[in-house]
Image (tube, rainbow, N blue to C red):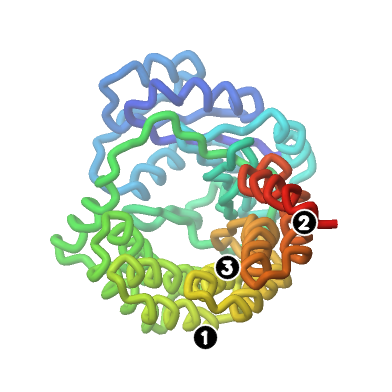
Amino acid sequence: MPTVSLCMIVKNEEMHIARCLDSIAELVDEIIVVDTGSVDRTVEIVSNYTSKVYSYVWNDDFSDARNYSFSKASMDYCMWMDADDILEETQKDKFLQLKQTLSLDVDIVMMKYNTSFDEVGKPSFSYFRERWIKNDARYRWIGAVHEVIPPNGSVIYSDIAICHKKINAGDPNRNLNIYRKVLKEGKSLDSRQQYYYGRELYYHKQYEEAISVLEKFLLSADGWIENKIEACSICAQCYYCLGQEQSALNTLLRSMSFDLPRAELCCEIGKYFLEHGNYDTAVYWYETALNRPRNEYSSGFVLPDCYDYVPLLQLCVCFDKMGDKKKAKEYNERAGVCKPYSKAYLYNKQYFDSLQIS
């Protein structure tokens, strides 16, 4: 049976770290914790779980810190988690089963990462990340921020999910400041880092600069298709914020020059036409979203609601606007099957009940 080293880098995580380790400690064979300068009780808390606690001088490079944590591991696989991640109880049997059955020929195990949740805790944003990595010098992190281990060798996908559940927000400027520092030092960003730099600029409402950075990424020969499609979505949001709605639509449509339409982008295009009163066209895009397959194994960002709940709810709105109350009610009922607890669905249900539509 393969053995697993849990490798973590932490700083000032006294609010999160015990919750994280309680969820995973009994399932792994070794715990490595690299502290990057905590001034709270983090080190004291983790010392209750492992003696393998190391100090590391932070140098604004997440990859370097993660590689240092991997260098201390002695098991077959290295597994990373952040302090605000947890393995929920429902996943533990699957985790143990994977340990019992995994062949050592496998180099990387991809696991689902749930990072956002709806009002009842159902994942609303998820993607796959490399989670177990063969303890081998060939597999090392790259990128100062939004670090990654480029997948190669034998890679498998597991439906085991790690949940990211932050209690307190961290420094919102950290990532952007690191990118600024890298560029100030005269270093260049590879295509993936260019994409994430553009995202950080968007988050900081620096829309024109974000568009400039992302356009350079979109025009480059390099870059992962999923990132290119997502970059179109981010650029469109920037254009919306700048009041340039036509440019936003053009950029959303441009996403289809990279691959077949994603439901997420179809919903955004549908929203544009819905807000502009072009209901027939909006219906086309929302119906297209409903018919798009959800490829959870692309490792791209997935918004599950865009494949059923969102387009169904918006189709309800479109047909209501067009005067077809019966069809609108049918779509709302289908949306309710997806999320019977949804406030929007329940509000619409009350509205249609008042109309006494059979």
Nearer-N-terminus badge (3/1): 1
Q: Are marks 3 and 1 in contact (CB under 8 Å)?
A: no
Structural distance between the alpha carbons of marks 3 and 1: 17 Å
Of residue 84 and residue 314, the one placed in the foreground of this image is: 314
On the image, the x and y values in percent for residue 112 come to 62, 49
Left/right placement of residue 356 relative to residue 64 reads right
Residue under the point 74% across and 34% down: 96
98 up-or-down from 188: above or below = above
**Other residues around mark 1 within 10 Å, as few (<14) / some (14–19) / many (≥20):** few
Hey, what amino acid is under mark 2? Arg
Which element is circle 1 on?
helix
- From the image, tell me which residue sits under label 1: 257
Nearer-N-terminus badge (1/2): 1
Residue under the point 54% across and 59% down: 301
* Residue 103 seen in render: no
Hey, what amino acid is under mark 3? Cys
Q: Looking at the figure, which quarter contains the N terminus?
A: top right
Hey, what amino acid is under mark 1? Ser
**Other residues around mark 2 within 10 Å, as few (<14) / some (14–19) / many (≥20):** some
On the image, the x and y values in percent for residue 279 come to 59, 76
Nearer-N-terminus badge (3/2): 3
- From the image, tell me which residue sits under label 2: 334
State which mark lies toward you, 1 or 2: 2
Q: Looking at the figure, which quarter contains the C terminus?
A: bottom right
- What count of labels does the image hold? 3
- From the image, tell me which residue sits under label 3: 267
75 up-or-down from 145: above or below = above
6 up-or-down from 345: above or below = above
On the image, the x and y values in percent for residue 19 come to 52, 23
Which element is circle 3 on?
helix
State which mark lies toward you, 3 or 1: 3
Of residue 140 and residue 239, the one placed in the foreground of this image is: 239
